[in-house]
Every structure is written in C-alpha cells, then in structure tokens.
Amino acid sequence: MKEEWVPADTLGCLMREINGLMHETTDSMNDMAGHQQNNINSIFRKGDSVYYLAFSFLFFNKSGSQLTERGAVMSKVRSVKNVWSRMIDKNKELKNVSKIHIDLIERLEKAEPSVAELNLSREEAEGKLKEGIPYLEGEEDKIELSSAVIQFRELSSWTGLGDSRSNFKKMGKKAEDMEIHHLLKAWLTGESRTIDQFGDKFHLPLDVLFVLVRYSLLPTLHEYAKEFDQTKVFNEEAWMKDYCPVCGDQHGLAEYRGSERFRHFRCLSCAGDWVFWRIACPHCDNRDHNKLSTIFIKEEKGSFQIDVCDECNGYVKGINKLDPSSPIFLLLDDFATFHLDMLAREKGYFRVPVKTGNLSKM
C-alpha cells in the first residue's frame, strides 16, 4: 500500500485554478453559470452530474474548511450561515456564492416528507440484501413521492439555477403534479427516456435537472434510509459493495471515523451509510496492496485523503469525521472537497460507474 503526501501549496494551486475558471466570466452569476454549463459535459461523465453545481457556484479558500454540526440547540441553517460568515471574512468573493448555497439549504429544510412504510418482512429485506439488491429497488411503487413533488417545485425557483432558472420557474408553474411524479419515479427506476422527455418538453438542461431531482428526493429517501436502519437486518460485513444498500446509488464520498478510522461510504441520494474494506478498490475489487495508493492532504482546517487504484484508475475521496454527517452537511462536505476530485482527475484517476443499482445507472 503506497502513500503520497501532497504539499499544501499544491492544493492551493488547484484551488486557485478552480477560482480562475470561476472568474473567467464575472459580469453576473448567470453568465458564470452559463459559461460553466457549456464546459461541464467535457469535464464530467453524465453520472457525475451531482458535481455540476459545486463546479459552477462554489469557490474554495485555501483552508478547505470542513463543515460540521454545531449541536442540537442551533439550527442547521444557522450553523451553515455561521460557517459561511467565517469563510467570507477570509474571502469577500464568497458572499454571492454563500447566498446561493444558503438558499438551497433553506429550501431543503422546508421539506417535511410523509413517508409510507414499505412493510417488508424481515425475511424479504434480508433476502434482497443477500442477493445484493438494495432495500428500495423493486419497491418504487410503494415510495411516497408527494413531498418530493412539492420539494421539486420549491427548488425550481432556487437562485442557484443560473441561466436555466427562468425555464425551471416556467416548468414549476406549468408542469402537472403527475408529470413531476413520473419524473421522480423514473429517476428511481433508472428510466432515462422519461427524464430526457421531461427535459425536452420544458427546455431544461439535463445536467441541472439531474441535480435538482436528486436534491428533491434526498429528504424523502433519507426517511426510508432511517426506516431501513430500524429493520436491523443490515450486516455491514456481508455487504461491502460500491453501491448503497438502501437506494442503490454509487457512493459519493468516504468518511474515516473512529479511532480505527474505518472507511464508511456515504450516499448522496439518501445519506445511506455503510462500511467498506480499507485496503480494496470498490470499483474493480482489486485487493493487491501494490496497486493501491493513498494520497494524503493535510490542511489548516482538516485532513483528507484520496484512495486510488492503479488497476482500474478509480478513486475514492475521503474526509476524517468524528460522527456521520447529516444529509445537509453531507452535501456540504461533498462540495467542500471538490478540489480532491480535481486533484484525482489531474493525476489520471476517475470515478468508475458501478454495474448494479438503478440510481447508479443514471
């Protein structure tokens, strides 16, 4: 198992490169969003569309601040605002971006999903997991999507939509509830044709539509993830897969937790949480330590790492955490570590799509 330490100034250069891309068009936030949208397809594969908004709207300061919860007394939104305030004190350019990001979080926090129980027997749930089938796969007709439909309309006027915001606002007024319902269900079942047709009808860029659908479903799917946890049927040692045992989406990042720093994969679609081997590639199952490496990054506000595989050129980005992040802060952790994705790609490593799970096929 090889190790590599990346000097802080290397990360600083990467962040300045990101900032440079962001500043190429500075007339307005909409112009910037449009510019980055034109470039996004040449940078990311379709399945990586969750990074669209991170690339388009989020600047990074050199500290690479890790966002953590402040406690039950302070609301999540208030906590996020405080983090942004400290970052803006160091970099005034973050002010407009913080408004966009906080607007997203405030809209997500409005969601109060009413979830219908799947009512799977213990034997049914255990049987699916033994076959490598995620908890929600095949149960899409039972998933209550009414709250997600409302959330989708709410996000259709989000300030972070850039040039496409006007089209999304028009869609939010014209689209029938059943159309949005079919769209969200199509995402869950992996029916890309339905999603493409919805985008064409309302003239919506698919990269942005993918992100909006994912965000709209997150509060609802997280409720099912909590229901899954309550079943007590999940055996972490028996799963050890690259896709989420709850919804089937590919892992978004890894959290290294506890004194033994177990590697926990986190899902960005439902905030699912599962353990994976420390010395193994989740993409190709390579366990040859001579072909596995870790890139360590030590920064002022935290330490990070990128686990890479020379067999398939896949990678997993990771962050050290004391406790698992809640859904809101999980998204922020993902955004705040975007420079790790840039570093991995610069070194020739990529996210490798998994072959199983409906969401992972999108």
Image (cartoon, rainbow, N blue to C red):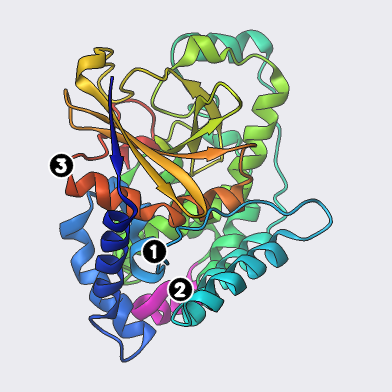
Q: x, y (%) of residue 171?
A: 45, 73
Q: Residue at x 68, y 51 (%)?
A: 69
Identity, as a three-letter code, of the amino acid under mark 2: Gly
Quadrant position of the C terminus in the picture? top left
Q: Earlier in the sequence, mark 3 or mark 2?
A: 2
Residue 78 shown left or right of residue 18 in the figure: right
Which of disc 3 and disc 1 is earlier in sequence?
Answer: 1
Q: Up-down: is 95 above or below 303?
A: below
**Disc 1 versus disc 3: nearer the observer:** 3
Query: From the viewer's perspective, is residue 122 above or below residue 333?
Result: above
Q: Amino acid at mark 1?
A: Leu
**CB atoms at circles 2 and 1 under 8 Å apart?**
yes
**Residue at mark 2:** 160
Per the image, label 3 sits on a secondary structure element best described as loop
- Read off the magenta span: 158-175
Q: In the image, what residue type sits under mark 3?
A: Gly
Query: Residue 115 or 245: which is nearer the viewer?
Result: 245
Residue drawn at (22%, 40%) of the image: 350
Q: Please tell me whether mark 2 sits on a helix, a strand or a loop.
A: helix
What quarter of the picture does the N terminus occupy? top left
Q: Which residue is mark 3?
A: 348
Give the tally of numbered discs. 3
Depth check, mark 3 against mark 2: the one in front is 3
67 in relation to 17, above or below: above
Reading the image, the residue beneath label 1 is: 53
Q: Residue at x 61, y 43 (%)?
A: 325
The residue lying at 25 percent from left, 74 percent from top is 20
